[in-house]
Image (spheres, rainbow, N blue to C red):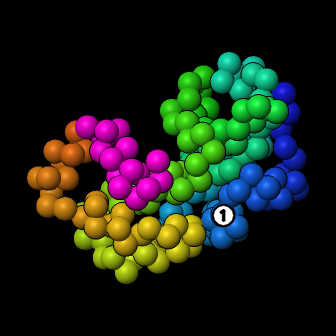
Amino acid sequence: MKKLIPKEERIHELLKFGAPRLFVENIGKIPELEFRIEPVEGAYFYLPTISNYEILKGFTILPIYDEGESFYVLAYTNTIQKIIHFELENDKVYDDYKLNWNLLLMDILIQYFEDTIDDEITMHQFKKVAEQLDFCNAEQLFNLLNCPIDEYNAKNEEQEKWRIEIAKELKIL
């Protein structure tokens, strides 16, 4: 890791890179996403100890949010800018969002939907959370996800393919 952006500069820098202000301001403040989108305390504690990770080499790192021992960060150089997700004890990128904030927000909402599927989440509840993230395609996303359980399970077996189809349908990709 070339540099870790200081905590006091974090919000300004995230906004400079196009992060939705409402999303940034609500990190750690949405009860429905309490364990999904956590403040960056862990990132600032652990990232200096793992600066030798191959996935971080040569990048300036800007923490976005924590999810337990997983981190979502903006990694950038003069020519590369990408939002990545990785875990504390694994030098591997799990998700690379390029600089597509809507794709990241879509994934957060898909996870929220999956977390609440057994509770029969309503469109209203889903839209309420989406509004706090500043995600504008909530109703369409909800309708794409809210299908009969057999159909949902079949589509979810090829999760990455379905996720790409959803993103294209929402005109995010």
Residue 93, percent from left and from top: 56, 29
State how many labels appear: 1
Residue at 79% of width from left, 55% of height from top?
Answer: 16
Left-right relation of 111 to 156: right
Q: Is residue 162 magenta?
A: yes
Is residue 69 visible in the rendered structure shown here? no
Is residue 54 visible in the rendered structure shown here? yes
Q: Amino acid at mark 1?
A: Pro
Our reading of the magenta stretch's main secondary structure is: helix
Q: Based on the displayed image, in which of its 4 quarters is residue 71 positioned?
A: top right
Please name the residue that numbered disc 1 is placed on: 20
Residue 15, percent from left and from top: 76, 59
Q: Residue furthest left?
A: 150
Q: Based on the displayed image, in which of its 4 quarters is residue 143 positioned?
A: bottom left
Residue at 60% of width from left, 22% of height from top?
Answer: 91
Q: Residue furthest bottom?
A: 124
Quarter the N terminus occupies:
top right
Query: 86 or 106: which is nearer to us?
Result: 106
Range of the magenta residues?
158-173
**SS at mark 1?**
loop
Q: Is residue 28 above or below residue 124?
A: above
Q: Is residue 51 magenta?
A: no
Residue 32, percent from left and from top: 47, 68
Residue at 47% of width from left, 77% of height from top?
Answer: 128
For mark 1, does the 10 Å Cα neighbourhood hold few (<14), some (14 to 19), or many (20 or more) residues?
Answer: some
Query: 38 or 62: which is nearer to us?
Result: 62
Left-right relation of 36 to 138: right
Residue 151, percent from left and from top: 14, 52
Residue at 47% of width from left, 53% of height from top?
Answer: 172
